[in-house]
Image (cartoon, coloured by chain):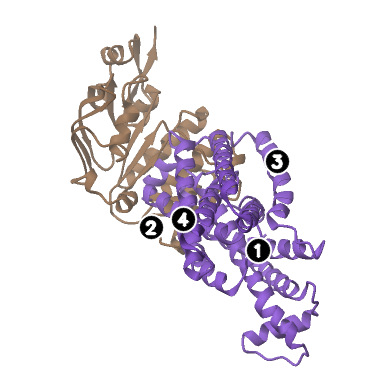
Amino acid sequence: MRYGLLVMVLIVLLIIATVLSVGMGPLQLSPMQSIAILLKQLGVPLNTAYTDQQEVVVTAIRLPRVIFGIFIGATLAMCGTAIQGLFRNPLADPALIGISSGAALFTVVVIVVGLQIFQSLFTILGTYMLSIAAFAGAFFTTILIYRISQAGGKTIVSTMLLAGIAISAMAAAGTGIMTLIANDAQLRTITFWNLGSLGGASWVNVAVLAPLCLICMIGLPSMSKALNALVLGETNASHLGINVEALKSKVIILTALGIGACVSMSGIIGFVGLVTPHIVRKMIGPEHKQVFVASGLLGAVLLVIADLVCRTVVAPIEIPIGIATALIGAPFFLYLLLKERKNQIVF
Amino acid sequence: MISVKNIWYKSNDTHLLRDISFSIDAGDVLAVLGSNGAGKSTLLKCLSKELTPEKGDVLFKKTLLGRWHNQELARNRAVLSQHYQVTLPFSVEQIVMMGRYPHFKNHPLPKDYDIVKESLAFAGISHLQHRNYLTLSGGEQQRTQIARVLSQLWEEDNNEKLLILDEPVSALDIQYQHHIMQLVGRLSERNFAVIAVLHDLNLALQYCNKALLLKKGEQVAFGDTGVIDRALIKKVYDVDSDLVYHAASNKNYIIITE
């Protein structure tokens, strides 16, 4: 499929998903009403009737949640693309190799320990604190996994995946210890973090999330050429004039920033970073610039739709979105493993 | 164009290179010869700025190699490695375009596409242009990589270029071994100097004009390929041989008699 066509299709899908998502829920809106309310926010009034209550529900509750989904889905997918490029392996995923767990552990520690010191974290500063903690967790985990899994200039995939298991287990143990000393309110927050949810969406949180995600979304595609060259191996990339050490640092910092921001806002939402770039590469090939853009769009579409399904399918109960992405993503991962084993390319 | 002055290289207290010195100019095709462990690959890494010699200097175009900026160096010399671990399904064209990366910032120019086309044609793989690299045979992959390093240096200017090849033909069938070496020979007419590690002495005699023979990190001989004789072969490879004259090519060839 042509890249330009795919991008057009994905933009249309994203608009449709947005309109559906702000319209559906306990209070139903027709698509025309949703469009009218959305366009009014952009300063374009339409002649469609809707109630004030409907407008408030859309602008105060559903729209920030959709924007949350767009930013988090796009960032997770683009970070997945970057991590796969860095590890030179299509099986790397921020959640799978423990980066998200590391971020979650640091976040939980701040929630439990930090709340006792600072009284309240529910301010903009507090929210940024969580993001910084998650960034630090993601950053250290990425460096650790990268160091462990590299030998002689290439990635030992089995080591990478096994190290991810070990780090996830350690992070789970750390989180478990935190639950022992947490109070009831903190416990609910921790559970929410571990399962992943877009329920924390608000305009305040969007204001914190958006700049961090934007840095990541603008920064990563600028490294496309270098990531392409890295597929030849580190030495061969440096023979092409690429500063490989600088590239690695930049990718690790930007993905840690993106993953950290997402995890601190929504908890661990796994497999988006694995599945999305893979689908995109199947359609338009592995050129990183194109994969970054298309993955970002597809990740946003997938997460907005997944969130819509999660909060409407057994309403009023809301399924944590991390469960939904794992339900779809885990079998997909097994399929990838089987396929790679047949090709014998990766292991 | 490149001159090596008394370089030494040590790893884990073992000297992998001892006092190597030689120099070549544009138009030269240098064969680096020697048995396994002679230090051929280590020497190539010192020449490509991957390793820094412990002692001695490598001058490329009269400037110390260490002083070259990576990107500028990449426009003037290309390196073909022995192994490539490509794991993503890039097309042949995309791999060859990577050779143009040092020349454009974000998007390839029409000139870059033209050069990729010419490099593909030069390496005889135009028909593979849109194929997935991962599905190619070993020989086809090797020719793709050769087209990539060609495209890296393929400029219509008078700049001298250096091409470093680590065992360029080891993985190839005989007809492609000769095909690639003929390409290399044609490059020497275009202001290129070529340094190639070779295992086949006869390929060296047929296509190279200079030879550097190494044994256990030491330089046994450097000079025109004519210097290669029975005594030298005995010294470097520890085998007996005869030199046979081939009138049509006016060259000597080697038959191992041991």
Q: How far is the residue under mark 2 from the one under mark 1?
A: 44 Å
Which residue position holds label 4? A225
Circles 1 and 3, Cβ within 8 Å, touching? The answer is no
In this figure, which residue is indicated by the disc labeled 2? B103
Which one is closest to the eye, mark 1 or mark 3? Answer: 1
State the image coordinates of residue B100 (x, y, percent, origin top left): 42, 54
> Under tag 3, what secondary structure?
helix
Q: Are both tags, 2 and 1, on one chain? A: no
Query: For the residue labelled by badge 1, is the local secondary structure a helix, a strand or a loop?
Result: loop
**Residue toward you, B22 or B253:** B22
Q: Label 3 is found on which chain of the structure?
A: A
The type of residue carrying mark 2 is: His
**For chain B, what colour was chosen?**
brown
Chain in purple in the render: A
Q: Quadrant of residue B1?
A: top left
Is residue B117 visible in the rendered image? The answer is yes
Q: Tag 1: residue type? A: Leu
**What is the C-alpha distance between the residues marked 1 and 4?**
33 Å
Name the residue rendered at 69%, 74% in the picture. A62
Q: First in sequence: mark 3 or mark 4?
A: 4
User: Which residue matches tag 1?
Assistant: A198
Q: Which residue is mark 3?
A: A334
Q: Nearer the viewer, residue B81 or A247?
A: A247
Is A132 rendered above or below residue A145? Answer: below
**Is the Cβ of the residue at disc 4 closer than 8 Å to that at disc 2?**
no
Q: Position of residue B220 (x, y in %)?
A: 23, 20
> Which numbered disc, 3 or 2, marks the residue closer to the eye?
3
Mark 2 chain: B
Local crowd size for mark 1, using a 10 Å CA cut-off: few (<14), some (14–19), many (≥20): many
Q: Residues within 10 Å of mark 4 (few under 14, many from 20)?
A: some
> Looking at the picture, do discs 1 and 3 lie on one chain?
yes
What distance separates the C-alpha of mark 3 from that of mark 4?
Answer: 30 Å
